[in-house]
Amino acid sequence: MTELCLTHLTLSHFRSHKTARIEGDGRPIALFGPNGAGKTNILEAVSLFSPGRGLRRSAAHDMARRPDAIGWKLTGHLRSLHQTHEIEIWSEEGNARQLKIDSKPASQIALGRIARVLWLIPSMDRLWIEGAEGRRRFLDRMTLSFTPSHAEATLAYEKAMRERNRLLKDQVRDGHWYVALERQMAEAGTAIHTNRVAALEQLSQAQAEAQTAFPTAELELTTTEGEMPLSEDDFREALHESRFRDIAAGRTLVGPHRADLYGVYAAKGVPASDCSTGEQKALLVSLILANARALARDFGAPPILLLDEVAAHLDANRRAALYDEICALGAQAWMTGTGPELFEELGDRAHHIHVDETDGASHLEDIK
């Protein structure tokens, strides 16, 4: 399998790290140390090597090391599909993030063509029992991993919907003001729905083909307004028909922004929301692994995986099974935990790094 990995990562004035350097060789990387030492900050840095706002969805100015607040910079050597790219990501004095690929200014979409990064973080453990917004975001991250242009469709849809919602709140009833916005929403919204459905199909196939220690999740895309319109014309007509109801509500009530992801523990036929905490975690791990397997086939290399506190709610057997699957897949997984014993099953299959904090700054130590 062709590798996709970071072979070098430098952090400068990023979060708790005044300066830090990690040299990788494609193996998984196990980061261990006390809470608050800066382990998750490293994972956040790696997450910025893919389109979007990163695993914390933070603004650029929030990533700067305090109290310096002079800006920050990340540099990485990304090995991707037989090529190595030098990537620079930085923010100066709280300004928007900037990006260069091989010394040339680049877009987030360009980054998405060469990098695939997936993550599982503790805040996602409540995915199945909290609001639909988090599940949509989870689904859209998976969809983006297959279709980088999904980000453009999402941004176009949200921009047009904000404008339409402004008209609705102002009680504008003249239909001429809505026509162009609803055309844009219909075009982008249909693309969003099509991309999501295609991603779910790939995930379903990847789960069906795999022999894994983790439970299979049956997934279904649902909406609060019944079936999503199947065509661009249908969606435009649905928006037109919903105008007076939307004016009363002050917001758009039909579209992919109302979708939800419904999951079922397949072997038990139990909704994911009714499963135990451990089962819910196992289902999430299963989906991340399925996403990775599907990407390995679709993209040509397994994605970089970010697994924050991955051992939480996994017993020793499932933890060992997870490590075996990661290594069999050939993915570079960046994992965090409080102690080295959580990664004993990996042995020399992983690069082990101790992360500690002294005088307000994080420090790294390679453990051979």
Image (cartoon, rainbow, N blue to C red):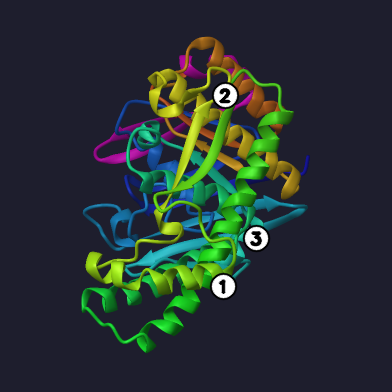
Q: Which mark is residue 113?
A: 3
Residue where numbered disc 1 is placed: 233
Q: Are marks 2 and 1 in contact (CB under 8 Å)?
A: no
Q: Is residue 14 left or right of residue 330?
A: left
Q: Is residue 362 magenta?
A: yes
Instruction: Measure the C-alpha gap from mark 3 to mark 1.
Output: 30 Å
Residue kind at label 1, given as amino acid type: Asp
From the image, state whether disc 2 or disc 3 is nearer to you.
2
**Which residue is drawn at the image coordinates 29% and 52% (left, top)?**
65
- In front: 102, or 222? 222
Q: Please state the horizontal and vertical placement of residue 276, each as a whole percent of the image.
A: 40, 18
Q: Is residue 244 magenta?
A: no
**Which residue is drawn at the image coordinates 51% and 67% (left, top)?**
235
Instruction: Measure the C-alpha gap from mark 2 to mark 3.
Output: 33 Å
Q: Evaluate whether residue 46 shows in this view.
A: no
Q: Please state the horizontal and vertical placement of residue 184, each as a whole percent of the image.
A: 49, 77
As helix, strand or loop, the secondary structure at mark 3 comes to helix
Q: Is residue 13 left or right of residue 171?
A: right
**Which residue is drawn at the image coordinates 71% and 42% (left, top)?**
296
Residue kind at label 3, given as amino acid type: Arg
Q: Which mark is residue 266?
A: 2
Q: Please state the horizontal and vertical placement of residue 186, each as a whole percent of the image.
A: 51, 71
